[in-house]
Every structure is written in structure tokens, then in C-alpha cells.
Image (cartoon, rainbow, N blue to C red):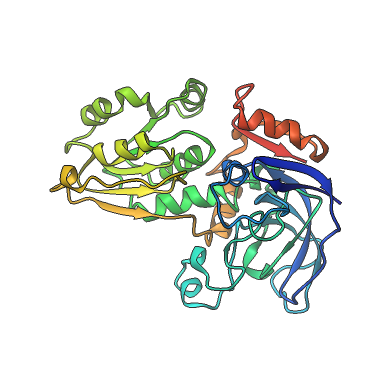
Amino acid sequence: MLACIYKNHGVFELTEKPKPTILDQKDAIVRITMSSICTSDLHIKHGSVPKAVTGITVGHEMVGIVEETGAEVKKIKKGDRVTVNVETFCGECFFCKNGFVNNCTDKNGGWALGCRIDGGQAEYVRVPYADQGLNKIPDSVSDEQALFVGDILAMGFWAARISEIKETDTVLIIGAGPTGICTLLCAMLKNPRKIIVCEKDETRRNFVKNHYTNVIVVEPENCLETVYNESEHGGADVVIEVAGNEESFKTAWQSARPNAIVTVVALYDKPMVLPLPDMYGKNLTFKTGGVDGCDCDEILSLIAQGKIDTTPLITHKFPLKDIEKAYDIFENKLDNVIKICIT
């Protein structure tokens, strides 16, 4: 089969690989109908993910059709159309049972697909613990509508959930890339008093302005002043940092009111420093980490009800054979790209 692999530092390559087979009776083989390129793939390419294995098939955003299941798979069957969760989780360990599936203690737990084991920028993928890692797509939901459920939409949903957003809150979201927009969509479900989105890229600012007219959109240099002017208590009640750079991290805690919640879901290329003397007395609550993707069934239900729509994020489509061209456009932010669909 065709597969896009992490050949070595800085190099992805489209090549031929053997079709995957069942290795454990809890596995499923999924024929990929649609996948996508994620910024996390670029982090792998450029060495920011030490766990990533060279030679691995990359890709962790995907939907497809179940081709084969192991004998112990009970919830899904051959022919089911499914989303694939970015995380592998056993469902039995302490963390899984408490809903912290990102911290599953299984050897394949956490972010495995497209990082430590073969992922979905290929024609087929093997999914461990298929009963946990696959979610059946409702008949009324298209592949395009479901494409981001297992990764960036699950992350946005999780970020909004743990941020404890109330209807009286002013919420600041820093970063309007694909994950930031998914976070925005999920924050909107909470009906906060006001949402402010901070983004440095003009194309992305215009995207938010055009699609979500009730959202206040600002550039980073005007963010603090705008947040203070639009907030009732000296800053945002909730800040969700999705941009992932030193300046955005600083903006996150500076723009929060005292006793606010600051949720950090961004992936950084280097350590960030909390300047505690400068923050003293703000009494902030920080929540950090990667997605706990255990809400996929609920997300699919919300999509089916018309309450979440991420299809506007798909600005480009390419067949798998042209994925190297797709990566060039995505990595270099050409042609006003937001997300690329790989068929």
C-alpha cells in the first residue's frame, strides 16, 4: 500500500509498505477513506517529538471503513464507517477508568498512531484497542464532517470542558489555527457572555471574522488592551492558549483576571517559564496537557444535530499520491491554507 513515512529528521516520504495485519485480537484494520495533515506531524518532521520512530507511517487524523477485526473486538464490525481516535487507550487502567485516556499506562497508550506505531496517511491502518479507539459515524454525518473528531475537535471539546466556562464569562482563545477554531466552536457551545480570539495571521483573523461574526478578533499587539476593555474584572475569566509560542504563553497569563483559569493545550518547541514573582497575587489556576479524547461519541452526536461544523476548515483536498505537494502547502502556509484533506 502507499504510505507517507517519517524517513529521517526533516524528511517525510511517500513509499510502498506492506498492508497491516491483525497483531492482537483487540485490533481492527481500517481502510482509510480520508485523512488530514496536522501541525503535530510537522513537529515530528522537525524533531520536536522525541518519541516519534523513524520509518513510521505518519498521520493521526482519519476516518475510514472497518475491513477486519480481532476476535475480542465487540463494539464495531466489518463495514462500519468510523472515526479513529488519535490516542490509543486500554480502557482498563486507572487513568482510563477516570477519563484521563491520554495517560493510559498500556505500552501503546497515549499518542501512538502516526508517532510510535504506523498511522493513517496511508491506505490502511491497524488500530489497537479498537473498541476504545474507533467510533461509529452516524449515517447522516459525512466523512468531511467527521474528519477532525478524533484529534483537533476532541482537543477543542476537551479544552472547553476543563476550562469550566460559564455563561457570564469572557473567554480569550489565543490562536486561530485549526485547533484554535475547533476550540472556539466548542467554547461557543457553552454560551459565554463574550469570546475574544487573538491571532497574528491576517488570513486566519479574516476567517474567524467571516464565519463567526459574534466573536471579537484581535491582533497580538492589541490583545491585552482589548481584553481589559471587554472584561468586567480586569481580564478574561478563562484563557485558552492554543498558539504555542513564547509570546502567546506570556499573553495567556497576562490577560487573565485574578483567580482565572488558564488552559494550555498548545504544543511547544521548547520549555516555557512561569515568572512567578510577576504573577504573584493573581492566584491563577493552570490546566495543561494533551487531549483526552474520550468524548468522540458525544461530539459525533453534536455534529449530527448540526451544533458543530468543522467543514469550513477544509480549504484543500489532495489524493494520497500527491501528499508531498500537500505538505509543502500546509507547512509553508501557502494559498490561504487552513486544513488539507487527503483522500
**63 displayed left or right of 173:** right
**Considering only vertical position in the picture, is 81 above or below 268?**
below
Quadrant of residue 243 in the image?
Answer: top left
Check the picture and name the quadrant holding the C terminus.
top right
**Considering only vertical position in the picture, is 141 above or below 73?**
above
**Percent x, y of residue 84:** 66, 57
Camera-side residue of 310 and 101: 101
Camera-side residue of 186 and 289: 289
Camera-side residue of 178 and 17: 17
**191 displayed left or right of 79:** left
Residue 314 shows in this picture: no
**Percent x, y of residue 144:** 68, 42
Residue 264 shows in this picture: yes
**99 displayed left or right of 280:** right
**Outermost residue to the front:** 9
**Considering only vertical position in the picture, is 173 above or below 138?**
above
Q: Residue at x 67, y 48 (%)?
A: 141
**Percent x, y of residue 326:** 71, 32
Label count reads 0
**Percent x, y of residue 157:** 47, 51
Quadrant of residue 40 in the image?
Answer: top right
Q: Residue at x 47, y 33 (%)?
A: 176
Camera-side residue of 257 and 215: 257
Q: Residue at x 46, y 29 (%)?
A: 212
